Amino acid sequence: MLNRRSAAALLFCVVGFAQQKNQEPEKLAPYYPTPETIVEKMLEVGALKPGEKVFDLGSGDGRVVVMAAQKFKADATGIELDQDLWKQSMEKIKRLGLDKQARIINGDIMKQDYSSADLLTVYLLPSSNDKVRPLLEKQLKKGTRIVAHDFEFSGWTAEKVEHIEDDGEGRSHTIYLYRR
Ligand SMILES: C[S@@+](CC[C@H](N)C(=O)[O-])C[C@H]1O[C@@H](n2cnc3c(N)ncnc32)[C@H](O)[C@@H]1O
């Protein structure tokens, strides 16, 4: 028989486990799209080649995924939490006839498998890069490139840093390239 104290401890564990299982995905950044010219630069800096697998973590309206598939002929996957952005980006992919080489997962960045990736693109907040980093360190195969827009990954050394002073609309950008 359980005494009161161990029954309470057991209940606490069960509730804690249930809460953990039902944990809401964390919003790691607001929607703030990368200008198309910078998307292209990011994919160039990442040296994306035809047939390679690229993932955009938090894909917004799907512009990175679409350009990776259409212009760079890569196999592109976006992960997007927001239902409307997911729907909108999937419709764009279908409309452009890219559904064989491009797709958006309506899910949480923190719950995906990136082990097949050749290239990752990331435009999240600095604190979110800190949260994602351990997952990437665990999953990514050796040689995977990571291109981060504007916010670097602390603890990693960038192989290349490219600064764009003016994107044509008065905004400056920095692109960081890492290799695992
Ligand atoms: C700054 S925007 C970048 C959009 C796109 N990658 C680009 O560069 O144009 C960040 C995106 O991440 C999405 N996001 C935030 N947290 C997420 C999560 N946990 N899982 C999936 N997507 C997430 C947001 O909804 C938003 O669309």
Image: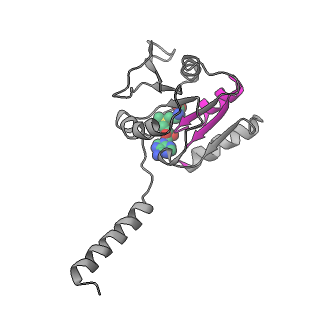
Q: Is residue 163 above or below residue 98?
A: above
Coordinates of residue 118 in the picture (x, y in percent): 59, 29
Q: Nearer the viewer, residue 163 or 10?
A: 10
Compared across the picture, whether 8 is left or right of 149 comes to left
Quarter of image, res 163 = top left
Residue drawn at (46%, 25%), measured in percent from left and top? 149
Residue drawn at (55%, 39%), measured in percent from left and top? 114
Residue sitting at the far right: 97
Quarter of image, res 2 = bottom left
Coordinates of residue 56 in the picture (x, y in percent): 55, 34
Compared across the picture, whether 150 is left or right of 84 comes to left
Q: Nearer the viewer, residue 71 or 46?
A: 46
Coordinates of residue 69 in the picture (x, y in percent): 69, 29
Residue 81 among magenta residues: yes
Residue 34 among magenta residues: no
Q: How many marks?
A: 0
Residue drawn at (34%, 28%), measured in percent from left and top? 154
Q: Which residues are magenta?
A: 55-82
